[in-house]
Amino acid sequence: MARLPRRLRRGDAVVLVAPSGPVDPGRLARGTRVLTELGLEVRTPPHLLDRQGYLAGPDATRAADLQDAWCDPGVAAVICARGGYGATRLLDLLDWDAMGEAEPKILLGSSDITALHRAFARRLGISTLFGPMPASATMADEPGPEPVTLTHLKSTLFEDATPGPVTGTASIGAEGRVAGPVTGGNLTLLAALAGTPYAMSAQGRIVLLEDVDEEPYRIDRMLTQLLQAGCLDGALGFVLGSWVDCGDPLPVLAERLAPLGVPVIAGLPVGHGSPQFGVWLETDGVIDTKSCSLTGMFRYPDRAP
């Protein structure tokens, strides 16, 4: 079982980092204001708005900002400003020994940040939070953050609240209720990590999958890659999030996953859609096909509804 970081309290310091694509200054300002209004002290490294083509600055700078924030004992959370592309390029540049000596803290992000979720699980044994980012549309577009997204984020981030179940719209696998650590994230990144030291292992776990702007045949190809690489062997069940601008991916998802004979629930607001809920990875969750829901239980699956 992964180590759980302490959840946040009002007054905690958090650092915004950009491990992937360049950050829009306007969205960043609005997202920073949202976090400040939650009672957090928001810090920004000097290179947060750097740009180098499709990256938020040079690899070495992005890696240093991430590592410095993680190793700072006065920081309670490292929050990725946005996704894009580039997090995989940092994995071999981080000093994992130094980061392993730091106290566990929250890492929040989604999409391309899936690469960091996998690496933090593999190298640090840390539970991380797959969820909305402050310079993304759901948090930073006018006229303000999407209300349901913000409410769920607060209940997920702060220690005086408990997030409720995340409910989907369909069950396409075996019926039942299973409990286990949740892993996974963005399908494209999980496929890209197959064959690397950070590849996902679904053994004894519930697997979260989501993506954006991918045609069904590409989803089929990536699922086939994960199946053939053994990354989905031993999965307890699957949670399928949003598939924005992916056509109708449900038939291919059902075709590839239902034969595994485990519960598969679909249509959960996790990933790139709106609203966008947060899911803790590498710690206990419960999926129930009757209610078509995922409940994050923070090591207490017996208390799930």
Image (spheres, rainbow, N blue to C red):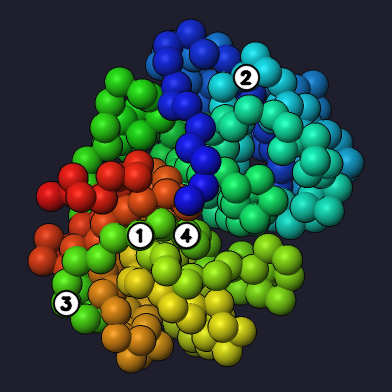
Q: Secondary structure at mark 4?
A: strand
Per the model, the C-alpha gap separating discs 2 and 3 is 43 Å
Work out whether residue 49 can be spotted.
no
Relative placement, left or right, of 254 versus 58 is left
Question: Which residue lies under the disc numbered 4?
Answer: 183
Sequence-first tag of 2 and 4: 2
Residue 175, disc: 3
Per the model, the C-alpha gap separating discs 2 and 4 is 25 Å
Sequence-first tag of 1 and 2: 2
> In the image, residue 71 lies at what x, y percent?
73, 27
Per the model, the C-alpha gap separating discs 1 and 3 is 16 Å
- To which quarter of the image does residue 131 belong? top left
182 or 135, nearer to the observer: 182
Relative placement, left or right, of 45 versus 144 is right
177 or 293, nearer to the observer: 177
Instruction: Give the amino acid type for the residue marked by disc 2 in the picture.
Output: Val
Q: Secondary structure at mark 1?
A: strand
Q: Secondary structure at mark 3?
A: loop
Rendered view: 283 above or below 247? above
Question: Which residue lies under the disc numbered 1?
Answer: 180
- Crowding around mark 4 (Cα neighbors within 10 Å: few <14, some 14 to 19, many 20+) is many
Q: Are marks 2 and 3 in contact (CB under 8 Å)?
A: no
Per the model, the C-alpha gap separating discs 1 and 4 is 9 Å
Q: Are marks 1 and 2 in contact (CB under 8 Å)?
A: no
Question: Which residue lies under the disc numbered 2?
Answer: 75
Per the model, the C-alpha gap separating discs 3 and 4 is 20 Å
> In the image, residue 33 lies at what x, y percent?
49, 17
